[in-house]
Image (tube, rainbow, N blue to C red):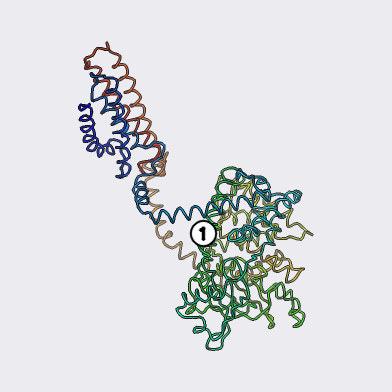
Amino acid sequence: MMEWITSLLVQLAVLVLGGFAVGRILGIRLSWGRWLVSLVVGVTAGGTIAFEFADRKIQDIDPWLVFGASLLATMVVAADPFGLLGPPGRLPHAVTGILRIPRLVRNARRGAGRGRRYAQVVAIAARHGLIDRSGAAGSGNALQPTADTDRPRGRRLGRPLKASLEEAGGAFVKLGQILSTRPDLLPTEVTIELSRLQDDVASEPRRDVDALLAEELGSAPEQVFAEFDPNPIAAASIAQVHKARLASGEPVAVKVQRPGVRPIVERDLDIARRLAVAIEARTEWGGDIGVVDLADGFAEALLEELDFTVEARNTTTCRSALQDGSIVRIPAVHESLSTSRVLVLEWMEGVPLRDAGPLVARHGLDRTELARGLLRAILHQIVAQGVFHADPHPGNVFVRADGTLALIDLGSVGRLDTLQQSALLRIVVAMSRRDPRQMRDALLDVAQARSGADEDQLERALGQFLVHRLGEGMTPDTKLFADLMALMLDFGLTFPPMVGGVFRALVTLDGTLTQLDPGFNIIDESTGVAGEWIGNAVVPETLREALADQAISLFPVLRRLPRRIDRIASAAEKGAFTIGVRLFADERDVKVVSRLVNRGLVAFIAASLGLISVQLLQGPGTAALDPLEGLGYLGLGASVLLFLRVLVATVGVDK
């Protein structure tokens, strides 16, 4: 027994030293945690074999066999071909996490809370028939964009979906409100149902609001404001708004974030993403529309809404981008009193659009002019300034007695670059002229291609689209945008989030304008405004400016052109004119192919070496070790090492 204990101690010492060499042998960098686990497994494997031999009283077993088995087990665990230990460097954090008991307890508590919430959301969805109890999609296929002829299916889904999101509350209500503006993704009947979603939340207690204001502003509310109404004039899931008065006598609106709302929102967003991953993995349409990307975009937008400094910046930007003579007003921000959780704005006296009927009648306001002014303001933000209100629903528009409109709640703002602005303007003009080629070119300027698109076929499809949607005698509506997005999806094209946000904003704006003036047609008015702007742009002054800009950009090219033409002519005259074509022009392609060829060669060498070694081991089978057998053992070990290196490189442990 003492011999085997001594053997184990020697084996342990050798493995400790050899363990540092394992990483070099396998071509990976081992963290101390991975090295420790592989060492324990290796010693355990060797010890098990040694004690088994001792129990059977086998005396003539070569100790190198035990050591070889230990070393092989150590290398296999270090390679971790199945990713059980995670990537290198992760295990020390896990071990450290175990030692940090308070953090572990907090994480466990947070995980338990998330698990309870997840179970609650799944139970709500199951109760309304959206999924089964296992979490598998029940009527999920109904979420695909559908034709108008399939309205009953959309209606059957829309009502339980709305009820589920309303009952789940929190971030899920916001998710439903955003989905209601995505007719490109959901059936029309579903978006109509989701548009009725409302935040049904109680206001925060006065003491909690006062405590948050004191924490953010550094003083009690009564020391900052001359007056502060404790009863909110509006309350939603993220924040509530109070009316107050500054010491100067100026009335202001104070938007206060609900205390403790961030961890709740983050938990709900985590659950929403997990559900999105499940949907994308289990349904074909989930992958087509990129449900996970949508969830990530929604999470990013909602987390931005939790930071009121973003809304303050958006408000200031949109206010400065208002066109001269516009009837739209945007409140000024009191930056000295605004923080990430408190936003103080100029008080805009007015009546919410949905309740503005008596005010409009009393002051004799022209509904059509109000609608046209609001549309012009939003379009100017989109195509001229590149910064626009992304959620102009009726609750965010106030009608004022002086005939102006107040635009509030700029927590959600879209931003466009100059190429996107120009392309959107050309899309509208192409619609008005029913020009499929111009429309195709403009769409391809801003679309993201998931697969190769046949441009000629796309042009023909757009021609049919324009005939069927904008033909003579037809009254276009905003469903045109959903149909356009569906057509783009058929060709493997999608709009960037911000461009898609423009169409969503216009769909939302259409509902607002219709409520303001039921006979208002946003498509006809938009094409008219776009044509007017294009006409104003095509004047001698602007043409001269455009030509000057192009000349400046082309001047360096024109200077180099004669020299390059002379160089080409000279090479052709000498017979030295050649054209180089590379099979792999992209360096990344070269690396991938080189890596694959390298791994294939190593695997082939390992297999060949293993077969040769097995043949060498088929000796006479005497007790003494034959030299050829020894060579076979060495070759077999080298073959295993080579296979392990290929395996490690394939699963990406060396990254």
Residue 95: image x %, image y %?
35, 48
Q: Which residue is more in the foreground, 474 or 262? A: 262
Q: Does residue 569 sit above or below 393 in this rendering?
A: above
Which residue is rendered at x = 66% and y = 75% of the image? 398
Q: Where is 125 relative to 593, above or below?
A: below
Q: What element carries label 1?
A: helix
Whole-percent x and y of residue 368?
Answer: 74, 74
Q: Quadrant of residue 532?
A: bottom right
Is 43 displayed left or right of 463 in the figure?
Answer: left
- In screen coordinates, is 59 left or right of 652? left
Q: Where is residue 511 in the image (x, y as percent from the top left)?
A: 70, 65
- Report the residue marked by disc 1: 266
Quarter of the rendering containing residue 87: top left
The residue under the point 73% across, 48% down is 153
| Residue 189 point in image, percent of width and height | 72, 55
Residue sitting at the far right: 473
84 or 556: nearer the viewer: 84
Quadrant in the picture for the C terminus: top left
For badge 1, the amino acid type reads: Glu
